[in-house]
Amino acid sequence: MGDSEADYLRETVGEALAKGCLKTALAAPSDPVEYLGTWLLKFVENAKIKDKFGKDKAKAAERRKGEAQERAKVEEDARKEKEKKDKAVEEVQKVVGDPYKIWSTVAASVSSLTPGCCYIANLAKPEPTEGEITEEDLEVEEVEPEEPEEEEEEAKEEVPAEGEEEAKEEGEEEAKEEPEGVTFDYSGAFLDFVVTSKDMEYILEKGLNFHRPIVDEESEEEPVPSALAFDILDKQKDSVDIPNVLYEPRVKFLNEFPRVGAFYALPIKSKNGEVKAIFCSDTLAPTGNGKPFNEESKGLIKSLIDAAGQAMDSTDEYFANCDAKAVAKAIKEEIFAALEDKPAEGEEEAAAAEAPAEGEEAPAEPSVAVKTAALHAKRTGKIADIVLGKMDKATEDIKRYSNAPTQTYGVLKALMILSGYDAGHYSTWKAVRKSFTNELFEKIKGLDLGSVTLEAYTHARACTKLSSREDLIAETPVSGLGLAAKLLFEELKLAIKASVVEKVYDLATCPHEDAINFEEFVAGIPGDKDDGGALTTMKLGSMQFKDLKETCDKLAEAVAAVEKAAAEQAKAEAEAAAAVAAAEAKAAEEAAAAEAEGEGAEEAPAAEEEAPAAE
């Protein structure tokens, strides 16, 4: 046997034979060959088992490593997902002010973090009623903008009398007791959908809203059931959870084509339990996955809804902490300071430059009506400019309301009516909320005051009949818009009336067959007069627009009638003159023709007499 064979045997079976021989020698069996052979077979079997165990152990270690990595990945994904959800909740809580923005933030998060799409309905209330303007109201004196009043100094802090402190402490303890449950009346409310996720905008385009069906007690037909979301209000449910809407007969599909999917609705509440809006979400295919919401998705939605409620509470606290009276006082003083009749910077120099030179005739002084109309138009523009300078804060005041602030809505609606907006811009608070831009006050500044109709003026007055300045101040605590808009409205009414008076003055200079007694009209205008009894200033606050408009229209009709009669007379005279001229021309033509004919007859015999002589 060569070295190579020996090396081969040593490397492959040498260790096994050596161990087997050692075991055989130690055991000293009666049949050592059989013992050694059996031991070697056992050795081979053990080696296979050991090898398999090693491989299995390595595989198990690899599997555990993979599982650990997978768990780490799942945990990391879960952590990131939780961070994303927590951030979404925080983003909702950060929004303060506009409830539409709060709800839009919720909708965006639900759309991106859950399999559903959503639409949020404001719990809308009927629009505030307008006051009715009666014939008696048209005789009531209208109030001009008043001068700012100095507020009384705050009463000094008084030292509590003996025993008052104890009573106060007892009162505080009573105040700490839990308040009794408050019941809210939602009977007149309806669901007005104002916010949707990006794939549901068609709901807003349709102007979708749900009202409770009107129940006819005398009808034998079964009443139509209300929308599912109303169960939150009427049955005081914390949620409405429908795993598959195909099995819910109350579900009505917009396109009347049934679709599979889930529906989930929750109320958005304030901390006192009042429902402000209702969140609705669904997974209807093909927009959604058609499956029920899992607990994780519903948990996230609930967290977002709770955050929305907290954001709305923070909004209420923010506005409640504003000093509405101080803000209103400041803007009132700013307005009346601007209305003081002082020339603006540069106006004095301009007036001096326009003054006639020595020896030149001075231009005619404008009438008191022209000056009054120009003054009120200018004052209206100044107030509008002040409001325009505070539009950011004013918008903040307006956008905080999902439902109409009664007094402010009435004044803004009145301004829109006088400015010529169509009803679609002011018929609802949602429309006013959308239309509240700089354009409104720019239109007021450029308004053709003489174009305002009696119908528009009366309608505007009806909108503000029930308004009170205290409520206007309380409703807009950030900007003072409510009070400023009221002062603007009052000044605008004066400007409109002054424009009508100016037109009356202008028409009175035209022939009008004594349609009105102009001197009597002027005498009836309140104001300041000079020593000669002539008006120098007009105070039109107590004069009714209806009376002025009727006088102006009557005078305009009379002037138009006189002008029409004059035009007809001029036309008749022109026609008569034309007829006379035509007759004279015709007579002249006939005379000329007759004369020409006579001359021809005389010439004929003369020619006959001359003929023989020629022969």
Image (cartoon, helix red, strand yellow):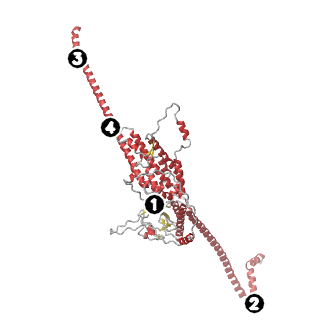
Q: Position of residue 337 (x, y in %)?
A: 53, 49
The amino acid type, in three-letter code, at marker 1 is Ile
Judged from the image, the secondary structure of the residue bearing numbered disc 2 is: loop
Q: Residues within 10 Å of mark 2 (few under 14, many from 20)?
A: few
Residues under labels 2 and 4: Cα distance? 156 Å
Query: Which quadrant of the rendered structure holds the C terminus?
Result: top left
Residue 72 in which image quadrant: bottom right
> Which residue is the site of mark 4?
565
Give the residue displayed 75% in from the left and 90% down from the top: 28
Query: Which quadrant of the rendered structure holds the N terminus?
Result: bottom right
Judged from the image, the secondary structure of the residue bearing numbered disc 4 is: helix
> Which residue is the site of mark 2?
28
Left or right: residue 516 compared with residue 259: left
Q: Position of residue 169 (x, y in %)?
A: 56, 71
Residues under labels 3 and 2: Cα distance? 191 Å
> Which residue is the site of mark 3?
601
From the viewer's side, name the closer residue of 64 and 469. Answer: 469
Q: Nearer the viewer, mark 3 or mark 2?
A: 3
Judged from the image, the secondary structure of the residue bearing numbered disc 1 is: helix
